[in-house]
Image (spheres, helix red, strand yellow):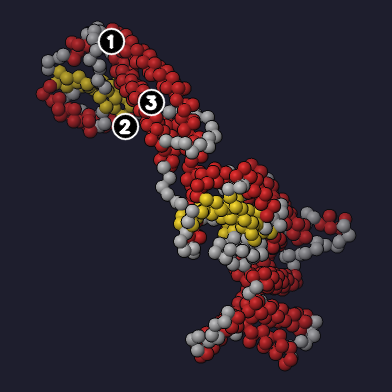
Amino acid sequence: MGIAKIKLVDITSNTTNLDAVLTRFVDLKDFHPVLASEIVERVHGSTSFVADNPCQPLLQDLDEIEKKYELNLPDIILKDYNYDFNEMYDYMSEIKGRLNDEVNHIKELEDFIRKYQDALIQVHNIENLDIPLDDLFACEFISIRFGRLPNDSVEKLRFFQSRPFVFKSFNHDSNNSWCMYYTTDEYKREVDNIFSSLFFERIHIPDFVHGKPKEAIRALEEEIKQAQKMIDQYKSDMYEISCGCSSRLACIKGELLFLNRSFEAKKYVVGLGDKFTISGFIEEHNVNRVEAAFADIKDDIDIEIQDADSDKRITPPTKLKNGWFSKPFGMFVEMYGLPGYKDIDPTPFVAITYSLLFGMMFGDLGQGLVLALIGWFFYKYKGMKLGAIGIRIGLSSALFGLLYGSVFGNEELLNPLYHALGFDHKPIHVMDSEFTMTLLIAAIAIGALLIVIAMILNIITLIKKKHYAELIASHNGIAGLILYGFILVGVALQFGLQIAVFNTITLLLFIGIPMVLIFFKEPLERKFAGHKLFPAGFGGFFIEGFFELFEIVLSYLTNTMSFLRVGGFILSHAGMMLVVTSLMSMVGGSGSILVAIFGNMFVMGLEGMIVGIQVLRLEFYEMFSRYYEGNGVAFNALNL
C-alpha cells in the first residue's frame, strides 16, 4: 500500500564494455533509468554518450516498405553489433525500387483499364449503329464528343437551348449522365466551352478501336482482358520479390530494432574518463534482477545498490502501489501531481473521502446501483479507470440512498423494509424541514474533521522530511492544528453542551501562542537554515506577516464553510427528484413511466457530473492544499 520502496542502482564499467553492458541493460524490466543530462550538469568533467541515432530513418523506411507493400515481416530477435548501415540502406533501396517499378506498372495498366471501360460504356451506347467509328469521327463539318456530365448540370442545359449543338443522354447513374453532343466545326470552340463550364468529362475512344461498334466492343474487351493478365503477372512478380526478400528484411528489422534501443539507451550513460556509469531505480524486491542480468559479465562491471535518496543530485521517482479499492483513484492523484518519494500517498485517503462525499451528495439506492452497473460496463469492456471509480461511488450512493430511503426518487418504497427491521421511519429524512439545520451543521462538522485529518497528514509528512520549523509553526502544522482544533472543540462545547472553554488562559495558550508561531514561521525557518532572521527589516516583515496571518485565519473559516455544499447537494438531489415524482403524478398513466425514466436519466447525468466535479474540488482545494504538493517524478520503467 502507498509508495513502493525503491533502491538506487549504479552500474559502472570501462568504456570498452559499453556495448556488452547496453545489450543486457535494454532488456531490464521495471528499471527506471536516470537521464545522463541530470548528472552531467552537476558533475564537472563528466560527458554524455548521446549521439544521432542512425537507426531511426532506416526503421521509418523499412516501416514504409512493410506497410506499402503489405510484407508482414516476421518478428526476429537479433543482438549483433557487427552491422553495416550502408549495406542495409542499399539492400532496402534496391527492394523498394523493384517493388515500386512493379506497382507503377500495375497503376499504369489499371489507369488504362479505367479508360477502356469508360470507352466501352460509350460504345455500348451506340452499338446499334451500323456505321464504322472511323467514319463517325472523320466527319469533315461535324465534331462529336462522348463523355459524362454531372446530373445536376444536365438540368442547366436548358439555359443554352439557343446554341448550335445537339445533346443526347444515353443513360445515367447516381452521379453522372453518360451522353454525347455534336456541333459544327464553326461553333466547336464555343460549344466545348459551354460543356466544359458544366464539368463535362470527355471520354476518348482509343486509336486502336476500328470498325463498327460491335467490332469495337470486342477489341476493347480484349484489350481489358490482356491488361488484366499483365496486372496479374506483375502481382505475381511482386509476390516473388516479397518472398525472396522477406527473410533478409526481417533480419534487418530485428537488428535495427535492437540497435535502435541500444542507441536510445546511450542517453542514460554518463562518461568520466575511461569509465561510464548508468544510474537508475528499481523496486527493492527486484534488485536481484539487475544482478542476474549482468551475471555473465560480473567480473567486468561494478553494481552498487544504495538507498533511493542517497544521491542528492537525483530525485527518486514515485511508484504508487495501492489496493483494489483505492487503486483507480490514483488517476485523480496523478491529475494533481504525483507525491514525492518521501511524501504520503494520498490515494487511500482520496478513495475513502471521495466515495463517502459523493455517496452523501448523490444518495439514491436505485440511481447508485445503475451508476455502479454503468461503471462496471466501462471498466470491464473499455478498461476505463473512471469506470472502476464509478463502481465504488455508485455503491456508496446506493448505501446512502438506503439510509435516505430513496429509490429513483421514491421516498416511500423502502418503508416496509424499515418497519421489518424494527424502525418506525427511515433513518435520515432529508426532506424534513426540521432536519435541514442538522444536515448543514453535520456537513460543516464533516468538513472540519477532514481538514483536521489533512493537517495531521501534513504533520506526518513534515516529520518524514525533517522540516521541523514548518512542522512547529506552519498553519497546517502543529500550531495550526492546535489553533483550529481548539476553536472547533470550543465552539462545539460552548454552543452544544453550554460548557464555557473560552477564557483568558485558554485563549492565550491555544490561540495566542499558535498565532504568534504562525506569524514568525518564516524567521524560524531562516533561523533553522542559519540565515538572517529579517533580511528585509522587521517593519516590512511585520506588515507582510500581518496580512498573511489574516488570510490564514480567514482561510480556516472559508475552507470549513465550503463543505456546506455537501448538505446543499443532498437537498438539491432530493429536491430535483421531488420535481420528477410530482411530474409523474401530474402526467399519470403510462406517460408517468416515461417521465420517471427520462427524469432519472436527466438527474443522473446532470447532477452526477456536477457532484463529481464538486467533490474533486473539495479534495484538491480544501484538503490537498493543506498536506499535499504533488511534485513527485513518475516511475517510468524500461520495456513497459
Q: Name the N-terminal-most of marks 1 and 2.
A: 2
Identify the residue shown where x is 88% and y is 55%: 420
Measure the C-alpha gap from mark 2 to mark 3.
42 Å
Q: Nearer the viewer, mark 2 or mark 3?
A: 3
Q: Is residue 426 left or right of residue 584?
A: right
Please give the residue where the numbered disc 2 appears in the rendered image.
152
For the residue pair 620 and 413, the one nearer the viewer reads as: 620
Query: What amino acid type is highlighted by mark number 2?
Result: Asp
For the residue carrying disc 2, how many other residues have a C-alpha within 10 Å: few (<14), some (14-19), or many (20+)? few
Residue 418 position in % (x across, y down): 84, 58
Q: Name the N-terminal-most of marks 3 and 1.
A: 3
For the residue pair 347 and 607, the one nearer the viewer reads as: 347
Q: Is residue 66 left or right of residue 477?
A: left
Q: Nearer the viewer, mark 3 or mark 1?
A: 3
**Which circle marks residue 99 in the picture?**
3
- Residue 68 lies in what quarter of the image? top left
Identify the residue shown where x is 59% and y is 67%: 629
Query: What amino acid type is highlighted by mark number 1?
Result: Ala
Does residue 572 lie above or below 274 as drawn?
Answer: below
Please give the residue where the numbered disc 1 appears in the rendered image.
216
Residue 566 position in % (x across, y down): 67, 66
Q: Residue furthest left?
A: 186
Does residue 237 lie above or below 10 as drawn?
Answer: above
Measure the C-alpha gap from mark 3 to mark 1.
35 Å
- Residue 330 lies in what quarter of the image? bottom right
Q: Nearer the viewer, mark 1 or mark 2?
A: 1
Query: What amino acid type is highlighted by mark number 3?
Result: Leu
Q: Is residue 40 left or right of residue 630?
A: left
For the residue pair 549 and 361, the one nearer the viewer reads as: 549
Residue 436 position in % (x across, y down): 72, 70
In this view of the protein, can residue 339 be seen by the observer?
Answer: no
